[in-house]
Image (tube, grey):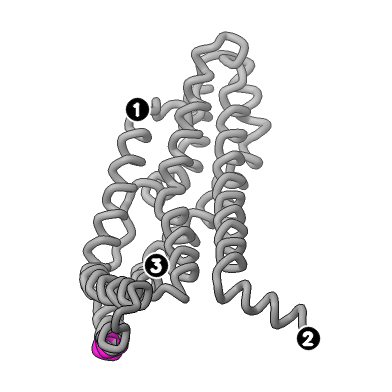
Amino acid sequence: FFEFIISILNATIQPLLSLVQTLLTEPANVNTFQPLWAVIVYVISMYYGLFFLFAGFNLMISGYDSAKREKAKYWLRNVVLMIIFVQASFLIYSLILELSSLMTTGVINIIDPKFFLMTLDNSVNFGLQLSLLIPYIIVLITTIILLGLRYLFAIVGVVFFTFAMFLYFIPPLQSYGKLITNLLLVVIFVPFFDAVLLFGASALLTIPVFANFKIVLTIIAFTAVNLLMILLIIFAVIKAAFGVLNSDIGQGIKKAVKYL
């Protein structure tokens, strides 16, 4: 009878757990956005010639001024790197997504699947599982929503990554390129840190004091995953914002506001 009850409970949460695992481990499929990426790269490529003309003109008029000559060479080098990284941005982004997926899958595979399911290991756990089923389902749904948003941002990120590569190699706008890149890297690699948290929570079951509170540990683990995703995004935004404010453009804006 108890096994029948447990099977019914597991049938309720199994689809949710499967969706969580898929959102954690599957790399975002960015192929849908490849046509849009191609259009953006085509538009950006129209600026290459202008940057080459600007750098070449500065190099010609630099004369014997070593500072201006080095600055012109720096611009030329950045334009060449910009062309390489912008044209290869789709491949680079796809490889980063695959790396994150492989790392996350490796951690998820070493977690005992029974950690997430209802079990009949002891009477205390059985009672807690019955009483905490609804909170567990709510936490799982919240996790699915956050991971779904993360998956959406990871897919759309291939477009923003192209702009990040473009802005990064323009010295006055480099901070904006770093801002976008930092945000995208957090979005891409947050599932790996989520998987590490889940593994850490599952490892606590080997400690006798936690053995009778498996469902509580599971709820805490998924709650920690949700908080981690939110806090990492906030931290990345704040860090990137300070980077922009400390840039040349940011300093200029602050001086303008101060004089106003």
Residue identified by numbered label 2:
260
Residue at the limit of the structure toward the top, as seen here: 208
Asked where in the image residue 60 lies, by quadrant, the reply is: bottom left
Q: Is any atom of residue 157 visible in this view? A: yes
Which is nearer the eye, 13 or 155? 155
Q: Which element is circle 2 on?
A: loop
Q: Is residue 45 above or below residue 198?
A: below
* 85 and 10: which is toward the camera: 85
Q: Residue at x 61, y 46 (%)?
A: 227
Residue at (60, 73) in percent of width and height: 250
The residue to which callout 3 is attached is 157
Q: Which residues are magenta?
A: 48-54
In the picture of the structure, the residue carrying the numbered disc 1 is 110
> Which amino acid, mark 1?
Ile
Q: Give the position of the C terminus as an image quadrant.
A: bottom right
> Secondary structure under badge 1?
loop
At label 3, counting other C-alpha atoms closer than 10 Å, the crowd grade (few under 14, some 14-19, many 20 or more) is many
Amino acid type at circle 3 is Gly
Q: To which quarter of the image does residue 158 belong?
A: bottom left
Q: Earlier in the sequence, mark 2 or mark 3?
A: 3
Q: In terms of secondary structure, what is the magenta stretch mainly?
A: helix
Is tag 1's residue or tag 2's residue first in the polypeptide sequence? 1
Q: Nearer the viewer, mark 1 or mark 2?
A: 2
Please give left or right for residue 156 compared with residue 33 in the image.
right
Q: Is residue 32 visible?
A: no
Q: Which of label 3 and label 1 is nearer to you? A: 3
Q: Which is nearer the N-term, disc 3 or disc 1?
A: 1
The spot of residue 233 in percent (x, y) is 56, 55
